[in-house]
């Protein structure tokens, strides 16, 4: 699922204190000749609030089992996100479908300035100070995936130094 991201570090769910956050539940309808069949789809974000996060989708005939399936799916897709002192290493844009998300690191004390699905993902990651703007589609599925696109492109200074084969000082001082 995260093959296109070089720095995406997959994480196993064992031993982590994961908290699940419900992004949204939709009632879906299938129309058959016998009438309408109602079901539910739930999108959930799980995270340990220290940089590990994942998202999942669950579908079922009732809400509780749809959420349970979504949590199980989210635990299969956990990734580690680099954080620097409660915020992000740098500004980043992400997009998925019609949704575009811009996340910007902020000074300590700013808080999480984000709306809807973006806020849910950033809180699950454990970011305390961040500015964000969501543009285009407000569909929670696409907004969550766009936020993950932005987060998975983040790289901290150590990773950049290792990739370039230079020291940390050279990354900062040029």
Image (cartoon, rainbow, N blue to C red):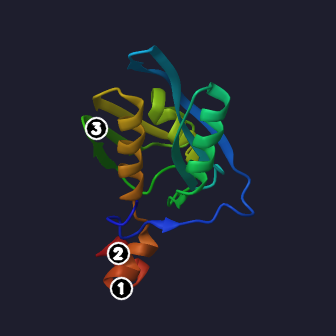
Asked if disc 2 and disc 1 are in contact, CB closer than 8 Å, the reply is yes
Residue 97, percent from left and from top: 26, 39
Residue 52 falls in which quadrant of the image? bottom right
Q: Earlier in the sequence, mark 2 or mark 3?
A: 3
Question: Which one is nearer the viewer's eye here, 138 or 91?
Answer: 138
- Say above or below: 158 vs 64: below
| Total residue callouts | 3
- Say above or below: 155 vs 134: below
Q: Which mark is residue 166?
A: 1
Q: CA distance from mark 1 to mark 3?
A: 33 Å
Question: Which one is nearer the viewer's eye here, 142 or 84?
Answer: 142
Determine the secondary structure under disc 1: loop
Q: Nearer the viewer, mark 2 or mark 3?
A: 3
Determine the secondary structure under disc 2: helix
Q: Which mark is residue 83?
A: none
- Compared across the picture, whether 153 is left or right of 136 comes to right
Q: Earlier in the sequence, mark 2 or mark 1?
A: 1
Please give the name of the residue rendered at 31% of the width and 46% of the height, measured from the top-left corner.
94
Q: Which mark is residue 171?
A: 2
Q: CA distance from mark 2 to mark 3?
A: 29 Å
| Residue 126 in view, yes or no | no
Asked if disc 2 and disc 3 are in contact, CB closer than 8 Å, the reply is no
Question: Which one is nearer the viewer's eye here, 22 or 66?
Answer: 66
Residue 4, percent from left and from top: 31, 65
Residue 65, percent from left and from top: 65, 34
Q: Residues within 10 Å of mark 1 (few under 14, many from 20)?
A: few
Q: Residues within 10 Å of mark 3 (few under 14, many from 20)?
A: many
| Residue 91 in view, yes or no | yes
Q: Which residue is mark 3?
A: 100
Q: Residues within 10 Å of mark 2 (few under 14, many from 20)?
A: some
Residue 6 falls in which quadrant of the image? bottom left
């Amino acid at each position: 699922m995260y093959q296109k991201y070089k720095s995406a570090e997959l994480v196993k769910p064992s031993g982590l204190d994961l908290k699940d956050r419900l992004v949204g539940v939709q009632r879906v309808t299938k129309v058959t000749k016998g009438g309408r069949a109602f079901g539910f789809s739930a999108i959930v974000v799980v995270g340990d609030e220290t940089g590990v996060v994942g998202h999942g989708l669950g579908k079922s005939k009732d809400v509780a089992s749809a959420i349970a399936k979504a949590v199980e799916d989210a635990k299969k897709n956990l990734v580690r996100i680099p954080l620097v002192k409660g915020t992000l290493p740098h500004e980043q844009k992400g997009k998925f479908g019609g949704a575009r998300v811009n996340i910007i690191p902020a000074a300590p004390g700013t808080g999480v300035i984000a709306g809807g699905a973006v806020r849910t993902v950033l809180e699950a990651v454990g970011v305390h100070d961040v500015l964000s703007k969501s543009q285009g589609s407000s569909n929670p599925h696409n907004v969550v995936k766009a936020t993950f696109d932005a987060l998975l492109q983040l790289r901290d200074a150590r990773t950049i130094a290792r990739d370039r084969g230079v020291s940390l000082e050279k990354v900062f001082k040029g």
